[in-house]
Image (cartoon, grey):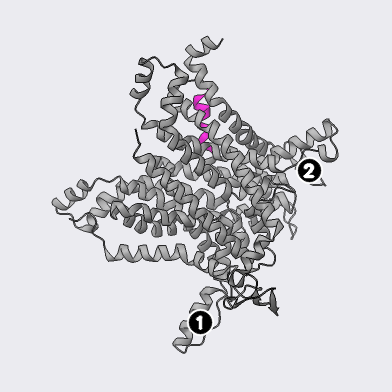
Amino acid sequence: MLQRLRENKSAQGTLLALPTTLWLFVLLIIPLVLTLVVSFGKRSPDGDVIYTFTLDNYVRLIGYSTDCPNGQAACFDPLYVNILVRSLTLAFNTTVLVIAMAYPLAYFIARAHPKRRNLFLFMVLIPLWTNFVIRVYAWMMLLRKEGAINVVIGWFADLLNLPFTPLEMLYTPGAVLVGMVYEFLPFMILPIYTSLEKIDNSLYEAAADLGANALKTFFRVTLPLSMPGVVAGTILVFIPVMGTFIVSDILGGRQVILVGNLIQRQFLDARDPTFGSAASLILMVMTLIVTYFYTRKFGFGEEIVAA
Amino acid sequence: MNPHRRSPLVLAATVLVYFFLYAPIAILILYSFNASRANVKFEGFIPAFSDRVVMEGSMVQSSPCGPFHWYCDLSRNNDVIEAAGNTLTIAFTATIIATTIGTMAAIAMQRYDFKIKPFSQLSLYIPIVIPEIVMGIGILTLFSQLFGWANTTFGLTGDARLSLGMATVTISHIAFMVPFVTLVVQARLQGFDKSYEEAAMDLGANEWTTFRRVTFPMILPGVLSGALLAFTLSLDDFVITFFTNGPGSTTLPIYVYGLLRRIITPQVNALSTVWILIVFVAVLLLQWLQSREEKPSH
């Protein structure tokens, strides 16, 4: 038997990949199928799942209702649709801001002296590996009324003899946006750096020889060649922002409710896993659609591994 | 054109972004020395050493540890010590298993053709393209349905009842770690010169000896950096742990999250600072391994 296995390359490959494949099958594929099944179910009075087939949860997500306040036959309550739109908008805004901040830094590192590049990259990694929850906490300390930002603005106001009332920054949509940008910035810097670093110097020389100025070189050479990095970074930022609930929980208070918060509450406070599962599937479908169209347009770079 | 020429605009943006990255961390560390227990404003450092802690209102006047009062306070917090122990136990166990099976999978994906290969490849990409919360609640549903069924079917009661805990967190961590280990090791295998192995075989080594003496030493830096990446992912994880932990399996991120919703003393800042220092050392180690990987000794 051992002899036969030694000759059968296909069986060897299957055996080597089997533990991982099984593990991922049980803990990824089965849970996704279960989520789908549960989303068609009904909530029992004590918060359990009754397995049946109903689209009620999806109808509720869209906001369609036949139980209307002023006696109409049917009406729409955009509560949940608004949450979805808010999450999409936030993910989009975060991604755009993160690209705008990450690109110059990645460009700087890629063009720095090779000996110093590792140090600069190392400086990007430190905040990345500082725990996610701790980073949200840091912004809580900065943004609150008595926090460091207001203190510093207060100093300047004093210096210029201007009146100053501390700004209310915590528990606003802006606070959530800043928190998200801070959390995910390193995920954009690394892949952009990886694709910028690959660009051969001779291309810049060729562009210069052909008479291109710095701006033209950037738009005709640098930017197109770094697109795989931007695409990979976008995937690494957009998807987690869509599903994160801690940032909005801590920095947004009850003001900013995202899909992540909605799902989390259905599982822990409201105890309606069927509705939570439906919301979770919609979230997954939304991110997959965005990722699909985005990668189809720009390709799927290997830069994703770099981060 | 000088390739290292810098535009002042890029330089200014770089300085600003680094400032943005580090200012919150600097503030976080500063507040770990705060004399004010309320920790709302920074009220200065704790000024003096003394035999016992002297408080005036919410201000610490002196402490046996002086300015490092909150670090000493932290070292006596049993909840933190338990959470740290849990975090490390989970990270170590999950890393060992994920690295082993992930490396095997990487070799399979890179070197072999087999029937379920497309399926394996697909499942390796799933954790990257779906939000973590989707995975988290899916796993929670799986465990709660499975345990509910098992507990009633087998009539399990008391301590025998299956429930969320260290095991469920560890098993779930392995699931999101494996794809990263596989990707890192696969990248290492891609740049691997097969002629070394062929030479070993020509010299009469069998497949196992070739693997042990040639292949494994050469991919070892890749395996180690995959393991270290997996380890840090596990330490950092909040979402999956949030949905799969139970009584007695609180990890540090979960513990800190719990505190953020209640009263926060500078002890949390001391904890964060210690954490940052540990991470700093871990990243240094990772960098060192990667630099070794770039210039193989063979």
Q: Amino acid at mark 2?
A: Asp
Q: Is residue B29 magenta?
A: no
- As measured in the structure, the alpha-carbon distance from the residue carrying label 2 to the one carrying label 1 is 53 Å
Check the residue under mark 2 and report the chain it is in: A
Q: Specify whether residue B117 is painted magenta.
A: yes
The residue depicted at 35 percent of the width and 36 percent of the height is B297
Quadrant (top left, top right, bottom left, bottom right) of the N terminus of chain A: top right
Which residue does the image show at 61% across and 55% down from the upper left?
A: A245
Q: Chain of mark 1?
A: A
Q: Nearer the viewer, residue B177 or B75?
A: B75
Q: Main secondary structure of the magenta part?
A: helix
Percent coordinates x, y for residue B177 in the rendering: 55, 40
Position of A95 with respect to B267 (left or right) is left
Callout 1, which amino acid? Gly
Q: Give the tally of numbered discs.
A: 2
Q: Label 2, secondary structure: give it.
A: loop
Question: The residue tagged with tag 1: helix, strand or loop?
Answer: helix
Determine which residue is flagged by label 1.
A154
Closer to the N terminus: mark 2 or mark 1? 2
User: Crowdedness of circle 1 by 10 Å Cα count: few (<14), some, many (20+)?
Assistant: some
Query: In this picture, which residue range is highlighted in magenta?
Result: B116-126
Residue drawn at the location 52% of the way across and 37% of the way down: B179
Q: Do discs 2 and 1 share a chain?
A: yes
Q: Is residue B242 above or below residue B267?
A: above
Q: Nearer the viewer, mark 2 or mark 1?
A: 1
Task: State the mark number for residue A48.
Answer: 2
Residue B271 tag number: none
Q: Looking at this view, is B182 or B277 the one in front?
A: B277
